[in-house]
Image (cartoon, rainbow, N blue to C red):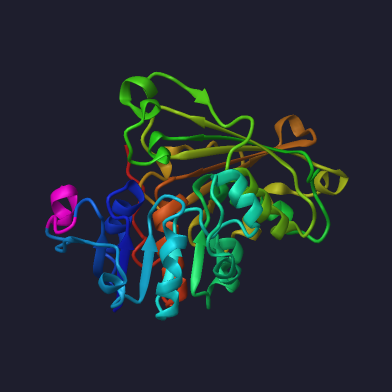
Amino acid sequence: MIKVGIVGGTGYTGSELLRLLALHPQVELKAITSRAEVDQPVSDMFPALRKKVNIRFTEPTLESLKACDVVFFATPHGVAMAQAAELVQHGIRVIDLGADFRLQNTEEFAKWYGMPHSEPELLKQAQYGLVEATREKMKNARLIGLAGCYPTSVQLGLKPLLTQDEALIDEQNIIADCKSGVSGAGRKATVGSLFSEASESFKAYGVSGHRHLPEIEQGLRAMSGRPVQLTFTPHLVPMVRGILATIYVKLNDKGKSIDLQALYEQHYNNEYFIDVMPKGSLPETKSVRGSNYARIAVHQPQGRDTAVILVVIDNLVKGASGQAVQAMNLLFDLPEHMGLEQLPLAP
C-alpha cells in the first residue's frame, strides 16, 4: 500500500484528493494536515467522507508526514517550496498541486506570483506534471510540479498540432479563450466568488496578463521545440466545476493539407483519459463533471484556414486532484487509471 499524506486538506483540491484516494485500492491515508483544524475529524468538515476517511487533521510537520511514501501539497503558492526540500531529503516523493514548481524560470515566478523562489536548486530537480505530455520524464521524479487547470486544457488541446516535425500552424498567433467555474478560485471568502456576485453573470479577467500564461507557453515551447506565442483570456462562468477552452489557430499550407480529425484521433488513440470526439461534436463541461477525462473536438469552420479546438475538463479533477492521482500511479508503477475510473456525473 502507498502511504499518502496531504498538506492542505481543507480546500477544494484537498477535499477532492480525499474523495479520490479514499477509494483507491492501493492507498492508505496516513496524514491530512491543517493548522486551523488540528485534531478535528476530517469527516466533520466533509460529511460526504463519513465512514470512508477516519482520520483527524494534524499539524503540517515532518513528524506527521515522515511515515508517508508520497505527500501532496494542495496549498497556495509559497507553502510547498517552504517544506518540500525536507520531505524530499527523507526520501518522500512530493506532488505539488500549487504553482511553486511549475515555472523553471525563477524570475518569471517572482514576476507572476509576487515573491522570490526560495528553493531554486530544488526547482531544478522538479519535473513538470502534465502526464500525457511529460510521462516519461515523470516516472522517476522525486518532486512534481503539477500542471495547472487552464494549462492542462490548453496544452492537451494543442499537443497534436505542436508535436509534429514541421509546423502545421502559425505558432506565434495562438488564441486560447477559456472559461472556468467558480471553484477554480479556491475555497476562500472573496467578493467575486460569492453566489450573489457570480450568479447570473459572465466576465473575463486577467486580460492584461494571467499567471497561467507563462506556464502554458513554457509547456507549448517544450512540445514544439520552437518559439510559441499565445493570447490567453480566462473567463468566470456561474457554475461550480468545469473548464471549456476554445482555442483558435491559423493553419499554414502544411496544416491545411492534413485531416485534423484523423491527426487528433491517432495522436490520442492510446490515452485512457483523452476522448477525441466524433467530427462535428460540441463537448460540454457536464460530460466530464467529477471525472478525470478530457474531451476534445476539432473544427475547421467553412473549411477555411482557422481551426477551432474545443477542450472540456473538470478543473478540480483532470485540472488538479485527478491528475495528481494519475501522477502518483505513474510514480509507483500502477495503472494510471487506478482509482480514477469514476464516470462523469449527469445531469
Question: Is residue 172 in view?
Answer: yes
- Residue 50, image x, y percentages: 13, 55
Residue farthest along the right direction in this orientation: 253
Location of residue 163 by image quarter: bottom right
Q: Which image quarter is the N terminus in?
A: bottom left
Location of residue 249 by image quarter: top right
Residue 34 as seen in the image, left or right of residue 155: left
- Residue 278, image x, y percentages: 57, 45
Q: Does the magenta stretch include residue 80?
A: no
Task: Say which residue appears at 25% left-offset and 67% top-offset.
Answer: 31
Q: Does the magenta stretch include residue 44?
A: yes
Q: Which of 277 and 180 is in front in this view?
A: 180
Q: Which of 29 and 159 is in front in this view?
A: 29
Task: Say which residue appears at 74% left-offset and 44% top-offset.
Answer: 229
Residue 229 as seen in the image, left or right of residue 197: right
- Residue 100, image x, y percentages: 51, 57
Question: Is residue 296 in view?
Answer: no
The region drawn magenta spans 38-50
